[in-house]
Amino acid sequence: RLRIVRRPRLGATTHRVNADRRSDRGEGDERALITEKMARLNTSITRLFNIRHPIIQGGMHYVGYAPLAAAVANAGGLGLVTALTQPTPAELKAELEKAQALLAPDCAGALGVNLTILPMFKEVNYDEYVRVIIDAGVKAIETAGRPPGDYVQAFKDAGASIIHKCVTTRHAKSAQKM
């Protein structure tokens, strides 16, 4: 015979405890309550990017704008502005400045850039995009598409950490050699 056991919802007791804490502290201190619950995880990703949570917002064409990247960073993850969503390098620079302005003073995450290197219908001046990324002081760069070998050394010289998004193990192994 099968016996169904209902488990309490995850977070149900936490909610009750938090309600008790809130009444001790006063009603207006919810941000402190949330921050108190969110301890920094210690993983290779959190150490590499100096972020609270090992969460990386992937580069998403026509979605990875400053507001989303800043929201992810403010929540403790790595928020990425998608470079090629910006039609020109100058507009990427403006978007990165906007993202920086949206960061909270106590931001627990970081901002980065996604640079996808693929054949496009129009000519893309990747060298200019790379220059803007380096000049903006971006320290976290996600690349995708063809191997970014031409740009890896420039990013490393600027003190940036690079993630190359791969679809196969073979590509990942070759990316490690860059």
Image (tube, rainbow, N blue to C red):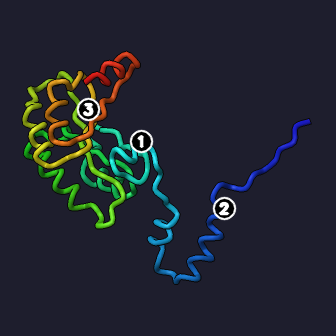
Q: Which residue is mark 1?
A: 44
Mark closest to the chain's N terminus, 1 or 3: 1
How far is mark 2 from mark 1, CA to CA?
31 Å
Q: Is residue 98 left or right of residue 29?
A: left
Q: Which residue is mark 2?
A: 12
Q: From what the image shows, is residue 5 above or below residue 151?
A: below
Q: Position of residue 27 (x, y in %)?
A: 51, 81
Q: Is residue 38 left or right of residue 83?
A: right
Mark closest to the chain's N terminus, 2 or 1: 2
Report how many numbered discs are placed on residues in the image. Answer: 3
Q: From what the image shows, is residue 5 above or below residue 126?
A: below
Q: Is residue 76 left or right of residue 15?
A: left
Report the amino acid beneath label 1.
Answer: Ser
Q: Residue, x 44% and y 70% (percent of image)?
A: 31
Element on which disc 1 rests: helix
Report the amino acid beneath label 2.
Answer: Ala
Q: Residue, x 25% and y 48% (percent of image)?
A: 65
Please name whichever residue, 37 or 30, is drawn nearer the observer in this view of the structure: 37
- Label 3: few (<14), some or many (≥20) within 10 Å? many
Kindly report which numbered mark, 1 or 3, lies closer to the viewer in this rendering: 1
Q: Determine the residue located farthest toward the top in the rendered image.
A: 170
Element on which disc 2 rests: helix
- Label 2: few (<14), some or many (≥20) within 10 Å? few
Kindly report which numbered mark, 2 or 3, lies closer to the viewer in this rendering: 3
Q: Position of residue 19 (x, y in %)?
A: 60, 74
Q: Identify the disc placed on residue 22.
A: none
Q: Which residue is mark 3?
A: 143
Q: Position of residue 115 (x, y in %)?
A: 22, 35
How far is mark 2 from mark 3, CA to CA?
40 Å
